[in-house]
Image (tube, helix red, strand yellow):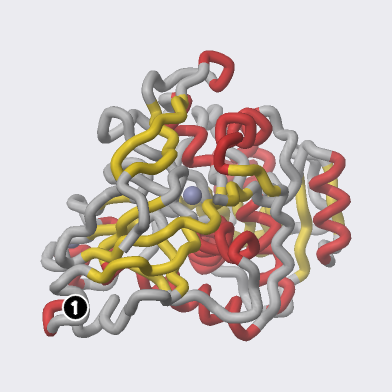
Amino acid sequence: MPTTTTMTAWQVRKPGPMETGPLQRVTTDVPRPEPSELLVAVHACGVCRTDLHVAEGDLPVHRDGVTPGHEVVGEVLEVGSEVGSAVEADAGAGFKVGDRVGIAWLRHTCGMCKYCVRGSENLCPKSRYTGWDADGGYAEFATVPAAFAHRLPRGYSDSELAPLLCAGIIGYRSLLRAELPPGGRLGLYGFGGSAHITAQVALAQGAEVHVMTRGARARELALELGAASAQGAADPPPVPLDAAILFAPVGDLVLPALAALDRGGTLAVAGIHLSDIPVMNYQRHLFQERQIRSVTSNTRADARAFLDFAGRHRIEVTTPEYPLGQADRALSDLSAGRIAGAAVLLV
Ligand SMILES: [Zn+2]
Ligand SMILES: [Zn+2]
């Protein structure tokens, strides 16, 4: 049980550009867990571009005054009465007070629709998300349905673990969607939190990685992590790419990314939000069986596979840290492209 009944949290009060102060810091009640949920004391929460989209109104809030944050690392303080029952037998069972736990973006699916049944729960029309439909981790406490809570790999600090929970998981799914052949050449467009983790996964799997990004610091980081080349956001890579992932939310980059693909190559668009894609030229951008694909959220199986991978392969996560009280500054820095790696709020 928490020792306090109130907490500090950030809420999206009036979505709009960061300069207009869309987030408000409030004192509010500590949430009560439902019978199927865990109550978690937040230790760290990653700052994801999706939080920025919610704060700025690119993604309309699903609930007034929602608390953003969906890369939450914390400690279980309370376990709902139904957690660990037969209903939860395959997921979320066995969490107990004191366990380290992760809360990610996906927090509910129906389990019955055709998408859920065929293993594509990321497409469930009834899916719900942390920090969008329900309050997230820009707060001292948060709740999570136990069936959607994650066990975390050992050997990482709270701060290092937080970005793995969205940046890492979504990047991992994007890599699967890009269908990079073994030993292939992978292009990463944009090199923020998700890309710098995904690059390391791809390198560990034997890929040759080429990075296209606007920030000089991000290009340096890419080379330090082992990328074969790093150039400007729309520049052609030195070799044709077997697969590419677009992390930057910039539709204009779809065209150079498609043009950079080798025959049969695939471009996966990782973001939840993308500005409009300009008109394509069939010969230059798609012919020779090049493909473009979106990436929509992730399944719990993706999350488990990635967190398991991170337990077996050390991932170096660059995490500029901010105190919880400066969440608005962290988002402004993200918006202005001032963050190298993945920012984390420490509680
Ligand atoms: Zn469903
Ligand atoms: Zn995210």
Q: What residue occupies the far front of the structure in this picture?
A: 3
Q: Is residue 259 above or below residue 63?
A: below
Residue drawn at (73%, 57%) of the image: 318
| Residue 274 percent across, percent down from the top left | 50, 35
Where's ligand 1: which quadrant? bottom left
Residue drawn at (69%, 71%) of the image: 315
| Residue 313 percent across, percent down from the top left | 67, 81
Q: Is residue 110 left or right of residue 176?
A: left
Q: Would residue 138 be seen by someone viewing this image from the given angle?
A: yes
- The answer to which quarter of the image holds residue 213 is top right
Q: Is residue 318 left or right of residue 114?
A: right
Q: What residue occupies the far top of the structure in this picture?
A: 20
Instruction: Identify residue for label 1.
Output: 88
Q: Is residue 137 left or right of residue 159?
A: left
- The answer to which quarter of the image holds residue 55 is top left
Q: Amino acid at mark 1?
A: Glu
Residue closest to the eye, 21 or 188: 21
- The answer to which quarter of the image holds residue 289 is bottom right
Residue drawn at (64%, 73%) of the image: 156
Q: Is residue 184 above or below residue 55?
A: below
Q: Would residue 264 be seen by someone viewing this image from the given angle?
A: no
For the N terminus, the quadrant is bottom left
Residue drawn at (59%, 81%) of the image: 154
| Residue 131 percent across, percent down from the top left | 37, 44
Q: Is residue 135 left or right of residue 15?
A: left
Q: Is residue 29 above or below residue 204?
A: above
| Residue 11 percent across, percent down from the top left | 39, 32
Dot 1 surroundings within 10 Å: few (below 14), some, or many (20 or more)? some
